Image: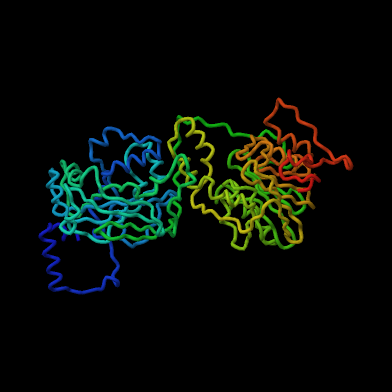
């Protein structure tokens, strides 16, 4: 192909006419597998000819749409990888280690006879044909590399699609106006339209090829990408102000279709890639080691990472220090079956926990898993549960889960340049977690306010005491063991967070938990509480050190701690007789 395009327009036309006159073989198109028109270009340059695309991307990254003056002065380009060119219908693996996998619809111009120090007119005449150009992009890797300020690297290294045809300029003459191709385009994922428009370029191919040829001899088969047609990629549709509205990045199994008037259509399936081999970071002599945080609260069991038995047939999995993302989980075993309370923030942590539980779950098959609420540090590991495990959650939890911050967004927070204060804080908080490969698995069973489960002949009560920390906050009560898994209604030794509220609901939830008269309480974060109700109440009141702890209300007939006051106007969810 490179030899053919090197013949120039006249030579290529003659070769085509000769093939029509005396074909060596005729193959129906339906029986052929089309490769890229130029399977291994000598050089690929991707240009940035659509300034509106750059404005849109810059707004996503920084909130500022104003481009620097240089964008209006230089027809910029960068070099892409010729060895990872894919055909128009060939499956494309994601970049290893990337969770922000994106496509970009562009037009590719292929050089014919080449030349050096070309004028824009000569450069346009050097184009032997046009094709669809998909610049596959690993956005998270891009962000990781951007502080280096050395241009594109692994973020753009994994794939470039060319095809399905090389269309000669004479066939596109009706769409050429002043050196600009004006073609209608459309991009879709799984047949859902993502973006579209026309190829009205700010810089023409003639201009960018002329610029690239300064002091450089362009060779036959070199490819120039136009840059992305505005809206024809995913990153432009991400909103900093409403991240939940984003459809998400590409995942294995997604089908990306790019259609361009006069050039045809590419249609490709996204494939998963193996995890990259880790390369340890170098020591930074300027880095200031941060002291290891220690949770100051006392604990009823040793506050160490791992599985701890806290009652007859009941265990908790603890993750010190209980800060952001370091959450607790639980396991309840009955006769022949067991129930899991929550998964963890990433797949590695969840797999480690499930492996440690196998001596128990091998004897008592895991049949149910209860989600205390929608936050990712309690749900991200759901996909590792066997399909036979029925996931249980409050209906509002199931509704909220798809609106939580997506794992791939959290992955980018680890690498985004968000400044010395916020950026350092977020990297410290999220740096230990690996958010790659996480796919949201939704609950199989939902309930409203309460649900009773039979786990191998053992009664397990699930109560939704929210909204407080989140839109729904479920606690898991095992009456015969005197154990309560409180989820994020309780943070022991670390600051409670009330995202949903109001505060009165949270106080009511604490009163309800006190009224359950349990001996052991496992918070969502932090150590297991001491086996006294007073310690439980103190743990929930840590943030008000100057406010006296009110007395624990007690039932007048038994002297035991009782539930919330019986007025329904002051304690949401309680009836006048004090029942739930």
**Left or right: 276 in relation to 294:** left
Q: How many marks?
A: 0
Q: Is residue 375 visible?
A: yes
Which image quadrant is residue 530 in? top right
The residue lying furthest to the top in this view is 546
What colour scheme was applied to this rendering of the protein?
A: rainbow
* Residue 518 showing in the rendered view: no
Q: Position of residue 406 (x, y in %)?
A: 50, 47
Decide if residue 98 is on the left or right side of residue 160.
right
Q: Is residue 114 above or below residue 297?
A: below
Where residue 366 appears, x then y in whole percent?
66, 59
Residue 53 position in % (x across, y down): 32, 43
The vertical placement of 426 against 99, above or below, is above
Q: Farthest right residue?
A: 557
**Depth check, front residue: 114 or 354:** 114
- Quarter containing the N terminus: bottom left
- Residue at (72% x, 63% y) in the render: 336
Give percent across and percent down for residue 56: 36, 41
Tell me: residue 332, above or below residue 534.
below
Q: Residue at x 77, y 52 (%)?
A: 312
Q: Nearer the viewer, residue 184 or 130?
A: 184
Q: Residue 212's image quarter? A: top left
Question: Which residue corresponds to the image point at 27% horizontal and 36% vertical from the top-left?
Answer: 71
Which residue is at 33% across, 39% downward? 55
């Amino acid at each position: 192909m490179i030899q053919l395009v090197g013949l120039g327009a006249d030579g290529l036309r003659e070769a085509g006419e000769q093939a029509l006159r005396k074909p060596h073989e005729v193959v129906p198109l339906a029986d052929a597998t089309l490769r890229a028109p130029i399977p291994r270009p000598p050089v690929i340059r991707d240009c940035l000819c659509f300034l509106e695309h750059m404005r849109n991307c810059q707004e996503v990254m920084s909130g500022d749409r104003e481009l620097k003056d240089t964008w209006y002065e230089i027809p910029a380009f960068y070099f892409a990888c010729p060895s990872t060119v894919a055909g128009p219908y060939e499956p494309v693996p994601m970049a290893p280690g990337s969770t922000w996998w994106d496509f970009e619809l562009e037009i590719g111009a292929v050089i014919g006879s080449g030349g050096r120090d070309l004028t824009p007119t000569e450069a346009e005449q050097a184009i032997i044909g046009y094709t669809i150009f998909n610049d596959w992009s690993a956005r998270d890797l891009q962000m990781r590399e951007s502080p280096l300020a050395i241009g594109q690297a692994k973020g753009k290294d994994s794939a470039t699609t060319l095809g399905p045809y090389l269309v000669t300029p004479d066939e596109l003459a009706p769409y050429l106006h002043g050196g600009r191709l004006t073609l209608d385009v459309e991009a879709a994922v799984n047949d859902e339209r993502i973006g579209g428009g026309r190829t009205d370029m700010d810089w023409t191919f003639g201009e960018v090829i002329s610029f690239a040829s300064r002091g450089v001899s362009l060779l036959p088969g070199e490819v120039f990408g136009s840059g992305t047609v505005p809206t024809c990629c995913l990153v432009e549709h991400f909103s900093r102000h409403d991240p939940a509205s984003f459809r998400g990045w590409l995942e294995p199994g997604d089908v990306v279709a790019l259609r361009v008037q006069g050039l045809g259509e590419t249609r490709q399936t996204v494939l998963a890639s193996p995890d990259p081999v880790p390369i340890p970071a170098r020591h930074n002599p300027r880095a200031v080691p941060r002291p290891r945080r220690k949770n100051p609260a006392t604990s009823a069991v040793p506050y160490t990472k791992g599985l701890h038995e806290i009652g007859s047939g009941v265990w908790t999995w603890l993750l010190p220090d209980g800060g952001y993302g370091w959450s607790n989980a639980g396991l309840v075993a009955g006769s022949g079956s067991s129930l899991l309370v929550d998964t963890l923030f990433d797949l590695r942590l969840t797999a480690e926990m499930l492996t440690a539980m196998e001596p128990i779950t091998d004897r008592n098959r895991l049949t149910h898993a209860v989600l205390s609420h929608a936050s990712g540090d309690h749900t991200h590991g759901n996909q590792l549960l066997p399909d036979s495990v029925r996931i249980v959650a409050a209906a509002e939890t199931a509704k909220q889960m798809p609106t939580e911050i997506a794992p791939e967004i959290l992955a980018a927070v680890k690498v985004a340049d968000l400044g010395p204060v916020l950026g350092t804080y977020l990297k410290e908080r999220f740096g230990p977690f690996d958010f790659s490969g996480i796919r949201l698995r939704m609950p199989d069973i939902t309930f409203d306010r309460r649900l009773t489960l039979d786990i191998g002949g053992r009664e397990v009560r699930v109560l939704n005491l929210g909204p407080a920390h989140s839109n729904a906050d479920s606690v898991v009560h095992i009456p015969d063991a005197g154990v309560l898994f409180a989820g994020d209604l309780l943070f022991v030794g670390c600051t409670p967070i009330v995202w949903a509220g109001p505060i009165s609901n949270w106080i009511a939830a604490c009163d309800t938990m006190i009224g359950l008269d349990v001996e052991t309480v496992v918070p969502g974060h932090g150590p297991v509480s001491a086996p006294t109700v007073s310690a439980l109440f103190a743990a929930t009141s840590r943030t008000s050190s100057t406010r006296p702890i009110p007395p624990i209300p007690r039932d007048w007939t038994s002297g035991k701690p009782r539930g919330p006051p019986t007025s329904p106007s002051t304690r949401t969810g309680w009836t006048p007789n004090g029942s739930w």
